[in-house]
Amino acid sequence: MENKGIPSTIYDDNKKEPVKDQPGDTGAYNFLAGGGVMGERIRSKDWSKTPLGPVEEWPQNLQTIVRIMLTSRQPIWIGWGPELIKLYNDPYISIVGGKHPEALGQPASVVWQDIWHDIEPMLQQVMEKDEGTYVESQLLIMERYGYAEETYYTFSYNPVPSPQGGVAGMICTNTDDTRRVIGERQLALLRSLTAETVDARTIEDACFLAARSLTYNRHDLPFALLYLLDTARNEVYLAGTSNIEKNHPAVPERVSLEADSVWPFLEVSQTGRPVIIENVDKHFEGLPTGAWQRPPSQAVAVPIPHSGETGKPGVLVIGLNPYRKFDEGYQGFINLVAGQIGSSISNALAYEEERRRAEALAEIDRAKTLFFSNVSHEFRTPLTLMLGPIEDTLAEKDKLTSEQFQRAEILHRNALRLLRLVNALLEFSRIEAGRVQARFEPTDLATITADLASSFRSAIEKAGMELTVETAIIEGPVYVDHEMWEKIVLNLLSNAFKYTLQGQIKVRVTPAGEGNAVELSVTDSGVGIPENEMPHLFERFHRVEGVAGRTIEGTGIGLALVQELVKLHGGSIQVSSVLGQGSTFTVTIPLGSNHLPPQQVAETGTTSSIRSRLNSYAQEALGWVEEAETSLASEWVDTVGFGGELEDNFEGVGAEKEIPTLPRILLADDNADMRQYVRRLLSEKYTVEAVSDGQAALEAARRNRPDLILSDVMMPRLDGFGLLKALRTGDDTRTIPVIMLSARAGEEASVEGLNAGADDYLTKPFSARELLARVAAHLELARVRRESEAAIQRSRDEAERQRQQLYRTFMQAPVAISVLRGEDLVVDLSNPVNQRMVANRAIIGKPLKEAYPEIPPETLEIFYRVYRTGQPYSARELLTPLDLNNTGELTQRYWNVAYEPMRSETDQVEGIITVSVDVTSEVLARQIIEESEERFRTLADNISQLTWMADEDGDIYWFNQRWYDFTGTTMADMAGQGWQQMIQPEQAERVKEKFTFHIQAGKDWEDTFQICGKDGNYSWFLSRAIPIRDKNGKIYRWFGTNTDITERLELEKRRDEFIGIASHELKTPLTSIKGYNQLLERIVRDSGNEKAKLYLTKANVYIGRLNSLIADLLDVSRIQAGRLDFNIGEFDFDDLVKEAVESIQPTTNHELKVNGKAETLVTGDRNRLEQVITNLLTNAVKYSPQASEVLIRVTRDDANVELEVQDFGIGIARDKQNKIFDRFYRVESSAKGFSGLGIGLFISSEIIKRHQGELAVESEEGQGSTFSFTIPISPD
Amino acid sequence: MNNKSVLICEDDEGIIDIAQIVLSDKGYSVICLVNSYNIYSVIEAKKPDLLILDLWISGTSGEEITRTLKADSTKKHIPVIIMSAHKNGPAIAREAGAEGFLRKPFDINELEEIVEQFL
């Protein structure tokens, strides 16, 4: 056995003293060297008595892992052999705890008896399946320090293979996670405690929420009790519990601090220190165990600190984790919990006190309003009781003397007035208490207001005044509460009338604001209101003093009420008035209903009829007029001393008791006395129609449906049962409640009646009370039934309407939609597109499976799953076979589908809405595009250019193979804008800028720059990119090429050189020819040989022409190569023209006439421009052989100079004119006999273009030509 | 008759011939070179008063000869006329430091005039 790499002396970490190798140990023991306590124990153990056998015989792999184990500081144990004989190291001792040292050499099943059921399956997996396993933060209750402790270990079990195959044993490394796990859950608890109590608004809430959040950590807080101190009573009371029943003996409701209790409340609250209570499980039976199997044996009582002024001291009792020592960490955690609860309580208390203060104020206000309301009620009852007899008295006018009658009338009027005042007050208190139930409905305000106003007409006209009503059309809905609106209008009218003794009253309803409001104005020509009174006009009970009115009645409450009512409508009221001339009250309310409380808005209007009671306003007004006529009123009022109220101005006209339509009762009885008796009993509350037999009753009921029928049984013509039967078969009459009246006593009679379908049965004789009670009860019953039926019907109608609407939408949808209902997914709707999908097969009413037999089960299952789970399903390009032609032949189609569950009001899934879009053609088209793109790429890979494709933003996503071959890059390097790093760095910025610009502008791009090859050398490329557009013209791709132009550039360079050499080579001999010619001329000149002189002059002309031909040819070559050189400078334009003319003049007989002057310096190439002018002049001369002159005109403006050369020659045909600036073009037909290469105008045109000008021609055949150019004086 | 000498360096024999005739007639002594290989030693030996150099001559170019001479304090006083058919001839000549330029094809009057300017 070798011992390589292991020192002979090993230091044990725990003991820090050298442990010597056992003397006499042979090589077999070397692997056991060191290893501290366990190394020692393993070495000294007699292993021959264990299944492992003597150490010398331990296999190599066991030796290796034992070595690993002994040298590791991590807790490790090894289980060897089928029994998993245990070996472990020093760090592991704490895990085996009390089982150490016996555990060494024992089978794992013995050592881990207590947790064997947990770990056995894992160990089996390791040993039998040769698979490592891993358990994270496994809870193990272990006795590491002499008590059962909650620990968490992460175990990793790894098999150790046997050389013979299979698993020889296992090695388990352990990591202690206990602190982390406990720390995390405690932190979590503190977090949720804070979070949950933050909203507590009362102490009770705070305690309840705090206690509730304590339940989240049942490990550290198996149970908890929260007590608060009641200092006044010197006791604590329970404020919250966690994980423990409130009726548990350990949870007293209240405990006096003096009393003897297991929980040390007194000590804790006095000392402010925690107190531990031992053996709580002995004190109380059946304590909750929290997260554990056994109850806590310890508990701790900690003080709840109270912070600030608002805190409230208390005691928190917590059952302690039985598997954890109550150490500093635990104690700290409990303190934090108690502290958090304390601050939650004090926060809540602060809030509560604030709220109490606010509530106290609100309470005072409420009390005031309630008092108001009560007083009004108290007044109303006696008033109502008074009014009855008065009215009775008035009704017997003929029995009264006129004096008595008048007194009674005055009495009546004043009682009414009092009642109105009380009603107005009541209305006010209702508004104040927010109990007004308004019903704002869309209203034709103009009409209703006009109606209301006209009810005053007779009173006003009787007083000799005029009433005008003006209404305009109001655009948009006006929402008002009819009752309130009536009060508003009538109060204003009543006021106006009261304070206007002559003249007119004008009511107007007009649009206002910017068309978003409506305005009601009531204008009178009355006494007006003093200016100082205006601000107080709408104050309750305010009185305007010293104003004459039609009557002295008034409470000073009317306008205040009007203002409140207007406010309820979200509107405003204004008044303008001139004393002695009249007043205008203007009410403005917004259009629409957005400013109103939605629950009080009704979208359907009731009929806007004017209710009967409004007449009383007008009647009262009429009364004033009549009073004035008789002047009795003032007399009487004076007499009874009401004069003191003269200053009391504005009349409040309150709500009067509404008189609803009385319920109608149909009575059928053949006995006239009976009819009279019943009618008398009922007529007070009901409208009674009495008939004498069943047939008449039936006809009456059919004619005018009564609310209830009382019917005798025994009657002529049609008896009671016959009537009942007939009623029950009629649609309109079926639901009318019927009470049978019969003299036949006894149970069986009533049973018979009820069996026949009567609603109730009364046996004669019946008491009045009984009849009234039954009638009232059935009417109420019928009303409730009617209402609920109506409500049900409405909601059914609504649901049906929605369904219909949805279905209509579905039917028109351009995608396939079907609705499947119920568990079997019966097809309930299949829209036309969906029908096409199934070849118009009849699928409605069929379950899905039958409707679509071709759909494979796995696809069907998708539908069932949606129905079962209520989870919507959607998929793209779902391949589903369908029998599209109803031939049984299945076609594979691609669908984009969405299956949406349909839910009932109760949220039950009741069906599925399916939406399917056939995307087959798109998918196929895309596949074709993908294929063609693939083909294209193959093609592109084989061409000599470097090609690429980019998306619409210019991000390249594909290069051809040539690119990669040339640059030696990969797609990963190149993606997006990566290609730019291949550009020659000095050119890169320019290229990028231009590229980006062109991509953004969507324009073709072309540029020339160098690209780095894989050899590091740059080559010149001409790069182009063109946008590829979809059918809408939108760019979706760029296609680019890079063509290697290194060779071309090389060629161009060579051509330039050639041009230079050619010009040299051609012109040099020309120079010589010219020279010799001139020498000859000199000789001839002196000889006087005139003939020779002439010939030589001609030779000179041809030399000149040859010279210019050579020059022109070279220029063309240069233009073609883009290499025409220019020497730009400043020169005098007129000089130029002069020189050019002078150079040509000697060669011709034409007179070259120059008109005009530029008188400016021009920037340009003087020689080139001279070339142009010379060319134009030469042409002019050449093509006008018959003419005698050529006109040259020079003009200029601020920026340009223009030169025209006009000849009077052969001219140029119109259709040829656009070609004459082309290279090598000659005006053939008419120009025969004229020599020239046809390049002069081409060169001239190019030169002028380069000077930012244009060469143009105007010509008519046979009339001559005018060539002209314009160039800028100072080009850019 | 004067004692001024003109050195003309030009590979076209026709031009040399003409120049020699024209300038000799004017009384100049003319030194002719058909290439520039020995031009410096010729200048050193003959000390011409004016140089007429073709721009593209076999051997060292007229441009380069001009630069060399204009950098040499003992020679830079000698005026140089460059002749060429090249478009950019005048610019090149000016750049190199030549005093004159004669565009090919020139006529003999031009030659006479320009030489007279310098001598």
Image (tube, coloured by chain):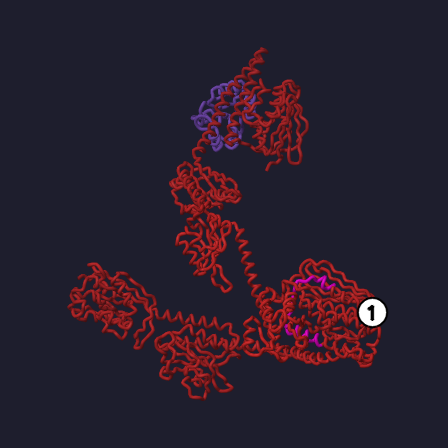
Res A1229 quadrant in image: top right
Q: Residue A495 at what x, y percent from top left?
A: 77, 70
Subunit bearing disc 1: A
Q: Give, as a three-letter code, the residue at label 1.
A: Leu
Rendered shade, chain B: purple
Depth check: A276 or A1179 in front? A276
Is residue B111 among the parts visible in the rendering? no
* Quarter of the image with the N terminus of chain A in it: bottom left
Q: Is residue A175 left or right of residue A366?
A: left
Q: Which chain does red denote in the image?
A: A
Residue corresponding to mark 1: A501
Would you identify the image quadrant in which residue A104 lies? bottom left
What span is colored magenta in the figure?
A: A422-450
Q: Residue at x 33, y 75 (%)?
A: A149
Residue A128: percent from the left, percent from the top?
Answer: 25, 62
On whether residue A437 falls in the magenta region, the answer is yes
Q: Is residue A12 above or below residue A945?
A: below
Residue A974 located within the stretch drawn in magenta = no
From the viewer's side, name the closer residue of A1020 and A870.
A870
Q: Pinpoint residue A806: horizontal percent, then vertical percent.
A: 54, 56
Residue A337 visible within the image:
yes
Left or right: residue A140 versus residue A1240 is left
- Residue A901: image x %, image y %? 47, 59
